[in-house]
Amino acid sequence: MRLVAGSAVAGQPFTVGAELVAQGDENAVGFSLRFDAARLEYVDAVATAGGFSLLVNRNQAAEGRVGFALSRGAGSAFPAGAARLLSLHFRAREVTGSTALAFTDSPIIAETVGLQAQVLPAVYQGLALEVLPLVAPSIVTQPEGGTVYAGTNVTLRVVAAGSEPLLYQWEYAQQVIVGATNATLELAAIREDQAGDYRVLISNGGGVATSETVNLTVLPALSPPAIERQPEPALASAGETVTFSVTASGSEPLLYQWQRQNTDLPGQTSATLVLEDVQVAQAGNYRVIVRNPIGTVTSQ
């Protein structure tokens, strides 16, 4: 049996995992934990695996001793391998520094019993624990607003520091957004009516930090380019001026590129192509490609 935990924070709850590394023939496990009651307060124990009964003796909890007895039914063994059986909930008192959770034999003896009711050899591994000072939340990186298009996916994010656990709550127009309790706020296929002011509140046992309020401007959804009027064929004599024009619609910016024989014409990037003093060598097929951020269309 071994204990597993990270650090604890003064004045805050924390959890210790009780893990059994079983050989596959253990029917029951008993143990007690000893701790400094001036530093730690025992709260409760929750079974995190099924198939066994749990008895907790907390009569000496105020003195820093709690006993646990875990038992499967007759003829049943804990599965082989490592498994977390219990989550032990404590609260750190307002005293920082190193402390320990150690196995002991009172009020329940530390003992592992096999399927044949025999006592099995077992190792009980305690835990050294560091109780850290409580650090109130602070914001390292503020969320950023901006201008977006309806229908796009938008992510607002914040980076915060402080003692864990940090609790997040995003707000829109200073009203709680239900379920928005992570460091990032995902707004999928954002709508125009979601434009406005956003902020996030970050809290722990030491206080609350409120982010800057950021504004999202939501423009109408982008539309791909479409050609409303195609360029018209032209017949010209050498030395004349020829003009091709296209009329396109779609979300700005619309970018144009004229081509001859499917090859770009350098510098010809407007809705109108003017060819002055045309020569016979310039005969051929002309077209224009129109682009915007979400699409491309090619003229006839």
Image (cartoon, grey):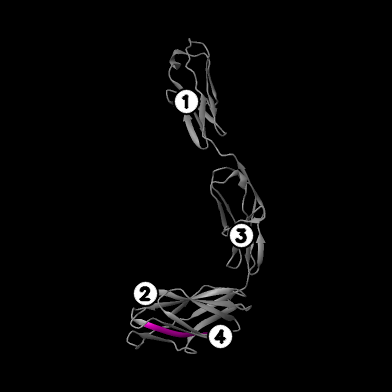
Marks 4 and 2 sit apart, C-alpha to C-alpha, by 30 Å
Write down the residue under mark 1: 299
**235 and 115: which one is in front?**
115
Is 91 in the magenta?
no
CB atoms of marks 4 and 2 within 8 Å: no
Q: Choose mark 4 or mark 2, whichever is in front.
A: 4
Q: Position of residue 299 (x, y in %)?
A: 47, 25
Q: Secondary structure at mark 2?
A: strand
Mark 4 belongs to which amino acid? Ala
Write down the residue under mark 2: 81
Q: Choose mark 1 or mark 4, whichever is in front.
A: 4
Q: Is residue 3 above or below residue 210?
A: below
Q: Position of residue 156 (x, y in %)?
A: 58, 52
Which quadrant is the C terminus positioned in?
Answer: top left
* Mark 1 residue crowding within 10 angstroms, few (<14) / some (14–19) / many (20+): some
Residue 61's label in the rendered image is: 4
Q: Magenta residues, as a range?
A: 27-35
Write down the residue under mark 3: 169
Among numbered discs 1 and 2, the one appearing first in the sequence: 2
At x 35% / y 85%, what residue is drawn?
A: 114
CB atoms of marks 1 and 2 within 8 Å: no
Mark 2 belongs to which amino acid? Gly
